[in-house]
Amino acid sequence: MKTNFNLSKWVRTNVLNLKAYSSARDEFSDPRAEMTFLDANENPFDNGINRYPDPQQKVLKAALASLKGVDPQQILLGNGSDEVLDLIFRVFCEPNQDEVITLPPTYGMYSVLANTNAVANIEVPLTENFQPNVSAILKKVTPKTKALFLCSPNNPSGNSFDADVLQALISQFPGIVVVDEAYIDFSSQQSLLTNLNDFPNLIVTQTFSKAYGMAGIRLGACYASIDIIALLNRIKPPYNINVLTQQRALEGLANQRHIQAQVETLLQERNRIQKALESVSIVEKIFPSDANFILAKVDDAALRYQQLIEKEIVTRNRSNQLLCNQCLRFTVGTPEENDHLIEALNILSC
Ligand SMILES: *Cc1c(COP(=O)(O)O)cnc(C)c1O
């Protein structure tokens, strides 16, 4: 639980004061088919996509709200979580003045977005076993610190942060805490969505790009208090989720069993790759994964990366990331793709 959180204190003054753009579909959105819509300068001839999309994505949010057990007004959708994360920076962080805290090694977009928004990125490294260092993080808080970005399960290490560490940070960090749950569907840990109403400073982000198998439609979501979502809505581009994306996402959500079956296959495959890596001599250390990828330390990451490319397998060399010296990151593929990877690693080890 967190009490005494005064949201407006954390918001940029221009965002508190601005009036959101009101689009044609915001002003009149009665979906009755018999209405004659002459308000948005669209081409009137129906081809399925001649009309602007619903700016509030009501049908899609209703489906997501019932699936996730939240109020539709606690959801904001973006063009990928990358847009959602950008909107969070822009609501809370004053350029050339404010700071955020991130915990390397982690998802590269947090520092990219800090840079593009002219916000200082204060880095507090994860511990050796890739957990947040709570006291070191809290020591870095200054009056300029607006937000803390946590990624759990973390990319590129693959582990989840301990539940009590997450709870401690959300309750003790004074500002906004963003928990990026891009990989939560692969995790043995519970989503923080169940705690959303206990923490008025919590924003949970998720994505359709990983477990849901829809990276191509660019759809990300964040969940937070109704007040935080209302602020994000003020600055989001009016028609940021296109008609085709909304349709495909709804179809995907209607097919939960299919997604669950794929997740189960990927988890079995993750275990299979893990076991295979254990018996490969070029692999020196395998980090436990709660996601759909495995980080492993090899004898020579640059060499092994190139050799795998020659075998037509593309992995990610994470060697230049903090605590990831000589590490490659392997995404879990289809069973056939994983056979290919395991075979290639065995050949390289001979
Ligand atoms: C892949 C990934 C995302 C997804 O970003 P989208 O813009 O939704 O595709 C978000 N966060 C992390 C940590 C990721 O690894």
Image (cartoon, rainbow, N blue to C red):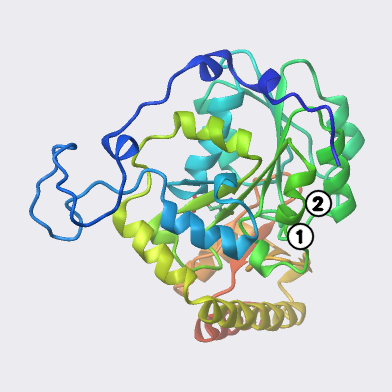
Considering only vertical position in the picture, is 15 above or below 253?
above
192 or 294, which lies in front? 192
Identified by mark 2, the residue type is: Phe
Q: Could you say whether the residue bearing mark 2 is in a helix, strand or loop?
A: loop
Q: Quadrant of residue 272?
A: bottom right
Residue at x 76% of width, y 82% of height: 279
Residue 248 placed where, x, y %?
37, 65
Residue 135 placed where, x, y %?
92, 34
- N-terminal-most mark, 1 or 2: 2
**Crowd rating for badge 1 (residues with CA inside 10 Å; few <14, some 14–19, many 20+):** many
Identified by mark 1, the residue type is: Asn
**Along the horizontal axis of the image, is 338 left or right of 34?**
right
346 or 19, which lies in front? 19
Quick check: marks 1 and 2 in contact, CB under 8 Å? yes
Q: Which mark is residue 159?
A: 1
Residue at x 84% of width, y 36% of height: 2
Q: Could you say whether the residue bearing mark 1 is in a helix, strand or loop?
A: loop
Disc 2: which residue: 130
